[in-house]
Image: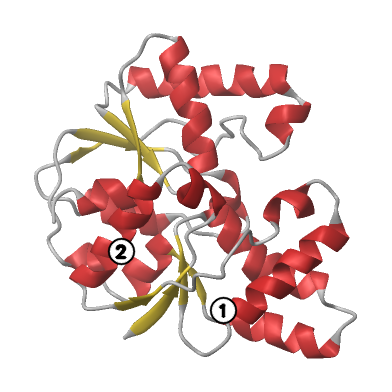
Amino acid sequence: MRIQFFSTCLVDTFFPETGEAALRLLRRFGVEVAYPKEQTCCGKPPHSGGYTHEARKAAEHFLSVFDGADPIVIPSGSCASMIKNHYPELFKDNPRLLEKARKTAERTYELTQFLVHVLNAHEAGLKGTGRITYHASCQLTRELSVKEEPLLLLNSLQGAEFVSLPHADRCCGFGGIFMARQPEISVALAEEKAATIRNTNADTVTGCDHGCLMNIHDALRRRGDNVAVKHIAQVLAEGL
């Protein structure tokens, strides 16, 4: 099987180790990974800010670069949701691109969706270590309805202990540009999330969106907590 991998801006710019972990995981299950070098932003940030014209330009570029029939795999719920839920909205007045957007949306997967529903990775006996908890990011949970897939994967890790995070789907305060526009509320939500994580006595907190994980990491460090913060691709790949 061949897939196209969209790394996202945050992975490409700040967290290449997550991209590398995702590729190791996919290759572990015999997947051939193509990485279109012309890829850029999917358009999520301008779309969130109300800059529809700029978002549409980025989306049109994405549709051109990720042309074809191969599945598109993305280590981000927010970026996957942008493509699956918002691209058809952006091109509703352009029949040609609307059809292309719909077909692209149909073959787009968030990473844990693909690992569970296509590769059955939760049945593969992956290994892990330590005590792990999980933050359920907003758009992954609410827009994509990806709720059980990360939990199936984390609970399947042999040698690790998974502990549920109370109010796991409560916002961490990142919210894309919300963090910049409402910093006081963002910090308060992040502090609440950090305290909840600390109370689980977990060694590691993981999630599927690096925006959330950055916010959580900063809140934990401000508290002086040394809980490791890792994308779920890294957690799953560590036992390979």
In this figure, which residue is indicated by the disc labeled 1?
66
Q: Is residue 223 above or below residue 158?
A: above
**Residue 221: horizontal and vertical position, in percent?**
42, 15
> Where is residue 240, by image quadrant?
bottom left
Relative horizontal placement of residue 126, taking residue 214 as reference (left or right): left
**Residue 94: horizontal and vertical position, in percent?**
86, 83
> Where is residue 26, by image quadrant?
bottom left
Q: Residue furthest left?
A: 159
Q: Amino acid at mark 1?
A: Phe
Q: Amino acid at mark 2?
A: Leu
| Point 35% across, 18% down: residue | 199
Dividing the image into 4 quarters, which one contains the N terminus?
bottom left
Q: Is residue 10 above or below residue 201?
A: below
Relative horizontal placement of residue 57, taking residue 221 as reference (left or right): right
| Point 72% across, 65% down: residue | 58
User: Which residue is nearer to you in this view: 189 or 220?
Assistant: 220
Q: Is residue 67 above or below residue 237?
A: below
Decide: few, some or many residues near mark 1? Use Cα within 10 Å; few <14, some 14-19, many ≥20. some
Tell me the CA gap for discs 1 and 2. Answer: 17 Å
Relative horizontal placement of residue 152, taking residue 34 as reference (left or right): left
Decide: few, some or many residues near mark 2? Use Cα within 10 Å; few <14, some 14-19, many ≥20. some
> Where is residue 195, by image quadrant?
top left
**Residue 148: horizontal and vertical position, in percent?**
40, 56
| Point 38% across, 59% down: residue | 149
Q: Are marks 1 and 2 in contact (CB under 8 Å)?
A: no
User: Which residue is nearer to you in this view: 103 or 199?
Assistant: 103
Q: Residue furthest front?
A: 37
Q: How many marks?
A: 2
Identify the disc placed on residue 23.
Answer: 2
- SS at badge 2: helix
Q: Earlier in the sequence, mark 1 or mark 2?
A: 2
- SS at badge 1: loop
